[in-house]
Image (tube, rainbow, N blue to C red):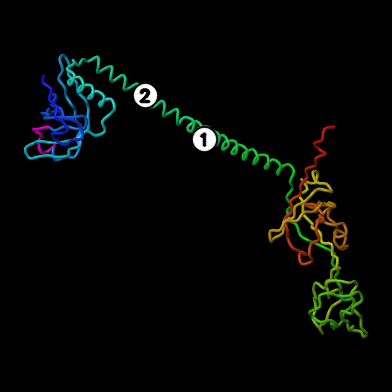
Amino acid sequence: MSTQVVHESEQTRQHARYHIPACLRINAVDYKINEWSVSGLSASGIPLDIGSQHQHHAHLEFDFDGFNFSAAIDIEILRYQDSGEMGCRFINLSKQNLSLIHHIINAFLEGQTVNAGEFIHIAGRDSFEKKHEETSEADQTGWFKRTQRAITRTLKRLLLFSIFGLLLAFVLYTAYQRLFIIEALSAKIQGQIIVLRAPNDGFFHTAIPHTTQYTDNGLLLGTLQLVNGGASSIEAPCDCHLLNTHVTDNIFIAKGEPLFTLAPKQPNLYIEAQIDFEHIAHLSTGDRAEIRLLNGDIRFGTVQKVIAHARSENLQSSPLKRPTAQSTEYAAAIITPDETLPLTLLDHVVTVSINTFKQADFDLP
């Protein structure tokens, strides 16, 4: 087998070209190689359907004494002539194939015999070097990946612990609400008020402007001209807020009808909350209460006393009616707020929650 080399001085090429016998196999068809190098080759007899395409997957075939060698390559067609001649270059050439091609070229140039054992040695060596490079790269990126995995595991654990903590908190909160929190059936802000009524039948004459809001003790509010003659004076019993005037001027008023509603300047408003009797055993004076106003404001207070909602004096107020022995449906908890409530909240409806938890009940003896 004769070896021919075309030098760089004869024709400008990137690499030296060799006339080492080989063939190019594309789609299971062998084509003659005119010359080739480590970067590409030229072949003849190439049909138009192959030459018109840009890239191909091919095999470089060598026929040695006793065995054949085939190297899988990808080629990119650089030129194609109507005569069927084609020039192409190798692309995506693996390091292993490049080493095998170099070995073939060096062996032919030095006149050495190529055997299968050398190919196996070269393939095994390149595979080891590739694995070593991958291992080195893995070592370089291993710390980052380990750190990333550790952070991911930590975040997953934190997420699980957070979910478990939220579930546990929800269960504990629900149990606490059922065991220690009493919700009032209804509640209203109340305070001390004074209702002035007509002492006798007569015609009422007001003595104050209709815009009056405050009264001094003893201030003349109006006069009542009695039907049988004479007159009665209606005076303010205290330094008060004038909450309401129930009558207009110069109208007839029957005995007992309301004339004015007043409240002391320090009304000391409180909350009366209706509590179901089944909770009375858990309720005691001194328990803390949360008072939620209709505008969303939250106030706090203390239970001062617990009484029956139907007062004894109310049950006995109508002597013509026989008092009933039927028990009332709920009790009334009187709650004093920690902060003074404005008089404008009088008779406003609120919601009340009473906390019956007592630390002393859980202290060890």
Q: Residues within 10 Å of mark 2 (few under 14, many from 20)?
A: few
Q: Which residue is mark 1?
A: 152
Q: Residue at x 23, y 24 (%)?
A: 102
Q: Position of residue 364 (x, y in %)?
A: 82, 32
Amino acid type for the residue under numbered disc 2 = Lys
- Residue 322 is labelled as none
Secondary structure category for the residue under label 2: helix
Amino acid type for the residue under numbered disc 1 = Thr
Q: Is residue 295 above or below residue 38?
A: below
Q: Is residue 5 above or below residue 213?
A: above
Q: Quadrant of residue 246?
A: bottom right
Quadrant of the frame with the C terminus: top right
Q: Nearer the viewer, residue 223 or 257?
A: 223
Quadrant of the frame with the N terminus: top left
Q: Position of residue 29 (x, y in %)?
A: 12, 28
Q: Residues within 10 Å of mark 1 (few under 14, many from 20)?
A: few
Q: Nearer the viewer, residue 4 or 29?
A: 4
Q: Is residue 359 above or below residue 261?
A: above
Q: Is residue 76 above or below residue 4?
A: below
Q: Position of residue 174 (x, y in %)?
A: 67, 42
Secondary structure category for the residue under label 1: helix
Q: Which residue is mark 2?
A: 131
Q: Could you tell me how far apart the alpha carbons at marks 1 and 2 are, in whole angstroms?
A: 28 Å
Q: Which residue in the rendered view is the most extreme toward the left?
A: 83
**Image position of 187 (left or right of 71):** right
Tell whether position 48 is magenta.
yes
Q: Nearer the viewer, residue 233 or 324?
A: 233
- Nearer the observer: mark 1 or 2; the answer is 2
Which residues, given as a range, are shown in magenta?
43-50
Q: Nearer the viewer, residue 290 or 204?
A: 290
Q: Residues at badges 1 and 2 in contact (C-beta under 8 Å)?
A: no
Residue 62 can be seen, yes or no: yes
